[in-house]
Image (cartoon, rainbow, N blue to C red):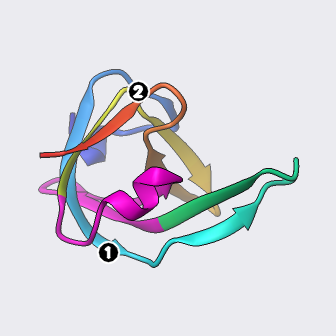
Amino acid sequence: MKIADLKKGPFEGSVEGEISELEEPKNIKTKFGKELIVANGTLKDDSGEIKLALWNEDATKYKQGDQVRITNGWVSDFQDELKISSGRNGTIEKI
């Protein structure tokens, strides 16, 4: 699957791309009081690019320039932009 094919919601299969930008991880607190770590960035392939959210241990595991595969992930619509993450049931791995 290519980035250009992604739509809001869960997806089955995998997307591969390069982390072309990645911010420093930061601590956030959810509206439910849970503390999480997030690193925001951009994932790109030959079809386009999409915002990327790396959560908790993934936020410090990857760096700019890494090639990754996200399998069975989630695409959300955040501030009128699509954003991909591994979600609750998906996985992300370096390739």
Q: Which mark is residue 11?
A: 2
Q: Which residue is mark 1?
A: 21
Mark 1 element type? strand
The residue shown at (64%, 63%) is: 79
Q: Nearer the viewer, residue 92 or 5?
A: 92
Q: Nearer the viewer, residue 25 or 79?
A: 25
Mark 2 element type? loop
Mark 2 vs 1, N-terminal side: 2
Query: x, y percentage for residue 87?
Result: 51, 36
Query: x, y percentage for residue 42?
Result: 35, 66
- The segment highlighted magenta reads 40-66
Residue 60, picture quadrant: bottom left
The residue shown at (17%, 70%) is: 65
Query: x, y percentage for residue 41?
Result: 40, 68
Q: Is residue 27 above or below residue 88?
A: below
Is label 2 in contact with label 1 (beta carbons under 8 Å)? no
Spatial distance from mark 2 to mark 1, Cα to Cα?
23 Å
Query: x, y percentage for residue 61?
Result: 34, 58
In the picture, measured across the screen, residue 18 lies left or right of residue 56, that is left
Q: In front of the other: label 2 or label 1?
A: 1
